[in-house]
Image: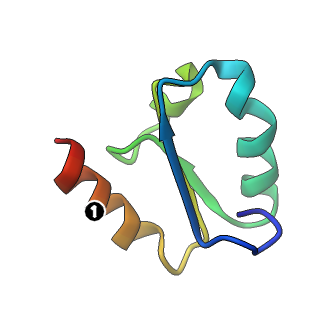
Amino acid sequence: VACGRYDLFFEYHLQPWDIAAGAFLVQEAGGKVSDFQGGNGFWDGSEIVAANPQVYLAGQAMLKEVFY
């Protein structure tokens, strides 16, 4: 996502060390990172969505619909 090869990435049941560097890189590249609800709960690794700003809201809405 950070280098532009993918528009959106999501995963759940990870550990914080699995997502820390990737979340940092995506944010520094201008992307959006959150949990499926749009909050900062992704740091515990339970769920994460990372996307470019153009598809972030649509992707997050899709994940909310599927998982909640």
Left or right relative to 8: residue 61: left
What residue type is disc 1 on? Ala
Residue ID at (75%, 73%)? 5
Left or right relative to 29: residue 32: left
Above or below: residue 36 compared with residue 43 = below
Above or below: residue 12 compared with residue 2 = above
Picture coordinates of residue 41, whole percent (x, y)? 46, 29
Q: Quadrant of the C terminus?
A: top left
Q: Secondary structure at mark 1?
A: helix
Residue ID at (46%, 24%)? 46
In the rendered view, how is the structure colored?
rainbow
Q: Quadrant of the N terminus?
A: bottom right
Picture coordinates of residue 8, whole percent (x, y)? 55, 65
Picture coordinates of residue 18, whole percent (x, y)? 71, 27
Picture coordinates of residue 34, whole percent (x, y)? 50, 45
Residue 52: which quarter of the image? bottom right
Residue ID at (54%, 19%)? 44
Residue ID at (66%, 70%)? 6
Which residue corresponds to mark 1?
A: 61
Q: Nearer the viewer, residue 66 or 21?
A: 66
Residue 48 seen anywhere in this rendered image of the structure = no
Instruction: Give the farthest residue toward the bottom.
Output: 54
Left or right relative to 68: residue 20: right
